[in-house]
Image (tube, helix red, strand yellow):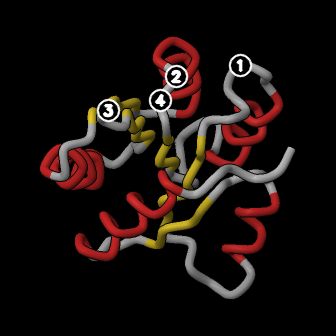
Amino acid sequence: MTAKILVIEDNPANMKLTILLLDYAGYQVLQAGNAAAGIAVAREHMPDMILMDIQLPGMDGLEATRLLKADAATRNIKVVALTAFAMKGDEERILAVGCDGYIAKPIEYKDFLAQVAQLLTVEGPAS
């Protein structure tokens, strides 16, 4: 069965690249341009993974992750931060709010697809 991945990203160029790579790798791809729309898509379609930009207009990706992880219906969806935040401590801070993984931008396509595949096969955090 093909994994379903939701991309929540407000930058059109980043969205296009991410979708192109995931589509090429054979994933079913959903998309949303902001956190509120992403949460609605997640609740409706229950993807296997969400690639969450952290710097989003309005509600940021960290708050969206907190809401998804607090909701019994969506808490088991893997949320992976896809972010330009790559300073010391950012990864720890992002994982602390409930993200299941962290991928730094700009993405290197081979590493990106390998990380997505690995994170899809890893069991989620212990409840």
Q: Which mark is residue 47?
A: 4
Q: Is mark 4 on a helix, strand or loop?
A: loop
Q: How crowded is mark 2: few (under 14 residues within 10 Å), some or many (20 or more)?
A: some
The amino acid at mark 1 is Ala
Q: Residue at x 69, y 87 (%)?
A: 88
Query: Marks 4 and 2, how far apart in space?
Result: 4 Å
User: Which residue occupies the foreground of this view, 51 or 48?
Assistant: 48
Q: Residue 106 is drawn in which quadrant?
A: bottom left
SS class, disc 2: loop
Q: Position of residue 17 (x, y in %)?
A: 20, 55
Tell me the kind of residue under disc 4: Pro
**Alpha carbon separation for disc pair 3 and 2:** 14 Å
Furthest-right residue in view? 127
Instruction: Please tell me how crowded label 3 is: few (under 14), some (14-19), or many (20+) other residues with Cα within 10 Å.
Output: few
Q: Residue sitting at 68 percent across and 50 percent down? A: 124
Residue that mark 1 sits on: 73
| Residue 44 to residue 67: above or below | above
**Rendered image: mark on residue 46:** 2
Q: From the viewer's perspective, is 28 left or right of 120?
A: left
Measure the alpha-carbon separation of dots 4 and 1.
11 Å
Residue of label 3:
1
Q: Do the residues labelled 2 and 1 touch (CB within 8 Å)?
A: yes
Residue drawn where x is 55% and y is 54% of the image = 80
| Mark earlier in primary sequence (3, 4) | 3
* Of callouts 3 and 2, the N-terminal one: 3
Q: Position of residue 73 (x, y in %)?
A: 71, 19
Mark identifier at residue 45:
none
Nearer mark to the viewer, of 1 and 3: 3
Q: Of helix, strand and loop, which one carries label 3?
A: loop
How far apart marks 1 and 3 lie (CA) works out to 21 Å
Q: Which amino acid does label 2 sit on?
A: Met
